[in-house]
Image (tube, rainbow, N blue to C red):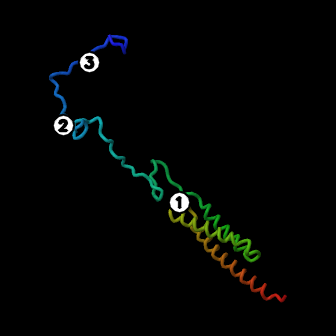
Amino acid sequence: MSALSGGEYSQPPAPDPGRALHDTSEPLGYGSDDIQGYQQPPLPLVRPASAYDLDPVLPSGYTWDPPSAGPSIAGFILSLAGVVSAIVMPLLIAPFAVAGIAVSLTALVRCRLGRARGRAWAVAGLVLGVVDVALVLLMMRLLIAWMTTIPG
């Protein structure tokens, strides 16, 4: 009787003398092709989608719709607001021109990568932003020239 189990200890079965032992020259699993249960699974046939992939891998039945043209339209509206207001208050509207150019450029890059729509809105916002900066600089030049010619 064993002190650990509290019951009767049974001996393991004796090895079968008719069965040959495996070759011990190399560890089990190395070079032994007869073992079928423990092989590496095959690689998947689907390639993973990267962050810059223009054709994402989607399950069947799903389609990919690019996001809306929101940033493109926002850049256009910022630039348009700058052009309309540049004549009245050029110093206060200059940040709108810079923001319009930045948002339009960002939207244009996203459109080029296929991640957004509204390329025409982005181009129009970029052109209006550049016109806005030119108008602000022209109005500043005229304001400085007018202030220097005032007698006083």
The Cα atoms of the two marked residues, 1 and 3, are separated by: 67 Å
Callouts 1 and 3 close, C-beta under 8 Å: no
Point out the image quarter for the C terminus: bottom right
Q: Check disc 1 and report its element: helix, strand or loop.
A: loop
What amino acid type is highlighted by mark number 2?
Ser
The Cα atoms of the two marked residues, 3 and 2, are separated by: 26 Å
Q: Which residue is rendered at x = 29% and y = 35% of the image?
A: 37
Q: Check disc 2 and report its element: helix, strand or loop.
A: loop
Q: Is residue 10 left or right of residue 77?
A: left
The Cα atoms of the two marked residues, 1 and 2, are separated by: 59 Å
Task: Say which of marks 1 and 3 sits in front.
Answer: 3
Q: Check disc 3 and report its element: helix, strand or loop.
A: loop
Residue located farthest toward the left when viewing the structure as drawn? 18
What amino acid type is highlighted by mark number 1?
Arg
**Which of the marked residues, 3 or 2, is nearer the chain's N terminus?**
3
Q: How many other residues sit within 10 Å of disc 2, few (<14), some (14-19) or many (≥20)?
A: few
On the image, which quarter does residue 133 sit in?
bottom right
Q: Is residue 52 left or right of residue 73?
A: left
Relative to 31, say whether 13 is above or below: above
* Residue indicated by mark 1: 115
